[in-house]
Image (spheres, grey):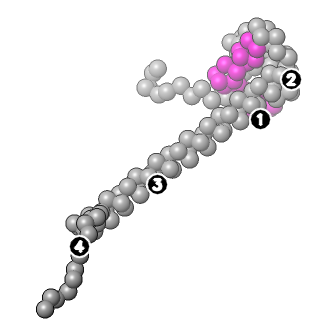
Amino acid sequence: MPGGGEIDYDAKILAISAAAEMAGMHPQTLRQYDRLGLVEPARTPGGGRRYSVRDVTRLREIQRLSQDEGVNLAGIKRIMDLEREVQAVRAEANAAVEELVEELHRTRTQLAELRSVTGPFGRSTDIVLWRGEQS
């Protein structure tokens, strides 16, 4: 890509006609999917819809589920809502795991510091019998 930049798949830059063509759909279908909440385009100040490359991918998935799998639009909406929930739960779980790993590293560091302070008496299991002075 010129300039060495990366593609922003979430940039809402595609007009409805371009997104519909890329997805292989009629623009009216995109309007219906917007009304149903299956896809959420951005709006221009004049009210025009703008789609991202990720939206086009989503539209293709909607079409696949509908045509190839026979899922109705309500079912597709439920599937996509559940997928969003799963992604959110995964993100939370990953954050929790990272936090636990950091805590484990801190605990191990503290343990190593404590072991270095205890010296040779730290884990001795020797029993010493002392009887005091003998006369």
The three-letter code of the residue at mark 4 reads Val
Question: Which circle's residue, 1 or 4, is located before the other in the chain?
Answer: 1
Assign a secondary structure to mark 1.
Answer: loop
- Tag in front: 3 or 2: 3
Assign a secondary structure to mark 3.
Answer: helix
Q: Quadrant of residue 11?
A: top right
Asked if the magenta segment contains residue 58, the reply would be yes
Question: Which circle's residue, 3 or 2, is located before the other in the chain?
Answer: 2
- Tag in front: 1 or 3: 3
Please give left or right for residue 91 compared with residue 21 in the image: left
Q: Name the residue: 36% across, 60% down.
A: 111
Which quarter of the rendering shows the C terminus?
bottom left
Would residue 20 be visible to someone looking at this image? no
Neighbourhood count class around disc 4 (C-alpha, 10 Å): few under 14, some 14–19, many 20 upward: few
Question: Which circle's residue, 4 or 3, is located before the other in the chain?
Answer: 3
Residue 118: percent from left, percent from top: 28, 68
Would residue 118 be visible to someone looking at this image? yes
- Tag in front: 1 or 2: 2
Q: Quadrant of residue 27?
A: top right
Q: Quadrant of residue 31?
A: top right
Q: Give how far apart the Cα atoms at labels 1 and 4 are.
A: 86 Å
In the image, residue 67 sits, relative to residue 86, either above or below, namely above
Residue linked to disc 3: 103
Q: Name the residue: 76% across, 7% down.
A: 68
Residue linked to disc 1: 45
Q: Give how far apart the Cα atoms at labels 1 and 2 are.
A: 30 Å
Asked if the magenta segment contains residue 134, the reply would be no
Q: Give how far apart the Cα atoms at labels 4 and 3 are.
A: 38 Å
Residue linked to disc 4: 128
The three-letter code of the residue at mark 3 reads Glu
Residue 36: percent from left, percent from top: 86, 26
